[in-house]
Amino acid sequence: MKCRRCGARAVAHLRHHNLALCEECYSPWLQRRVRETIKRFHLFDRKAKILVAVSGGKDSLALWMILTKLGYEADGLYIDLGIDTEKYSQRSLQYSRAMAERLERTLHVITLQETIGKTIPELPAARGTCSVCGLVKRHYMNTWAIEHGYDVTVTGHNLDDEAATLLSNVLNWQLGYLERQAPCLDEREGFIRKAKPLVLCTEKEMLIYCMLNNIEYIQDECPYSVNATSIFYKEILNRIEHEIPGAKLRFYSEFIKVKHGIFKGFRKERLTPCKICKTPTTGEICAFCKICIAPPKPQHSIRETSRASSGPVRAKIEKSGRNSISSKNMEIKTGSKKEV
Ligand SMILES: [Zn+2]
Ligand SMILES: [Zn+2]
């Protein structure tokens, strides 16, 4: 098969675009597609100070490289979740550091163990580990970016991720989630602007980009995501895509087109600042603080209580108490950052 652009031997055949591209033409094509996504959805402007949520995986590392190649000012933020299984967090950090060096950009690192005195596996996981992990990452991406003067945070969610989330939200008719599912969430009181420049790029497209640009990334799935329903939804969507090329892209992009009309007049929940961290929330204390910061309730087992109160950071947080609000917690959070 020949490249549609230059006639050389094609290395990638993208059935959903009915497009074949060679090694030379592929990366500029994908970069242009990201640039068009940024423009089409008004994600951010040229001068924006961007913070990329870097996980060590292919999408976030490739996104960081693409934004830099497109001329944007983008730094990285890596959140060390303390996942020990096969040194998952450690290896992910190494790949992230290697990309920072390659791009000559700053990688900021937050270590959960230092910040809240616990790692992801040690946090209560009644909502499921992936859900708690997502909550923690969103919290730090938001508060840290605001505190450090960034204009927008970007994540490497690709089309496959977004289509799987959309399928899940539709199957469960999660109207609140559907209303918020978008390539960009504008900044508002207590929330930084959030953007997803890869929403129109498939997982396969990102994989090819990484291979052609020698991007090394953590290839294993997170050990906690093995049974995640999102993986099942992706498999289902891939089966549909195999039979109907382009179905995934249409499913997502048509939703984004009609969404505004569907949710016109949709009443959003009223938010007030969390009593501990000030992040807007529906209750008195946000979900992050309930799980990670708030003192354990008396009915907790002795083992849990003693573990929860160990470590210097934990002790500091407990001393600051529920009512002394955020300044001390902010101090704890920012105090543990390192620059690489
Ligand atoms: Zn070509
Ligand atoms: Zn909070």
Image (spheres, rainbow, N blue to C red):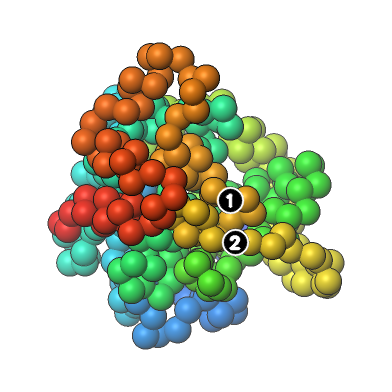
Residue 135 against residue 183 in the figure, above or below: above
Pinpoint residue 28: horizontal percent, then vertical percent.
40, 72
Q: Position of residue 207 (x, y in %)?
A: 43, 50
Residue nearest the observer in this picture, 126 or 131? 126
Which badge, 2 or 1, comes first in the chain's sequence? Answer: 2
Q: Is the Cβ of the residue at disc 2 closer than 8 Å to that at disc 1?
A: yes
Q: Quadrant of residue 313?
A: top left
Image quadrant in which the C terminus is located: bottom left
Q: CA distance from mark 2 to mark 1?
A: 7 Å
Q: Camera-side residue: 52 or 238?
A: 52
What residue is rendered at 71% in x and 43% in y? Answer: 168
The residue positioned 40% from the left and 85% from the top of the image is 46
Q: Residue 150, position in %: x, y?
A: 36, 72
Q: Quadrant of residue 259?
A: bottom right
Could you say which is closer to the camera, residue 30 or residue 6? Answer: 30
Q: Quadrant of residue 113?
A: top left
Name the side, left or right, on which 265 lies relative to 329.
right
Res 216 visible: no
Q: Which residue is at a point 64% across and 54% down the rendered structure image?
A: 282
Above or below for 116 versus 180: above
Considering only vertical position in the picture, is 4 above or below 159? Answer: below
Residue type at tag 1: Glu
- Name the mark on residue 272: 2
In this figure, which residue is indicated by the disc labeled 1? 284
How many labels, in total?
2
Q: Amino acid at mark 2?
A: Thr
Q: Secondary structure at mark 2?
A: strand
User: Few, some or many C-alpha atoms within 10 Å of disc 2 (few <14, some 14-19, many ≥20)?
Assistant: some
- Give the residue at the far front of this rendering: 323
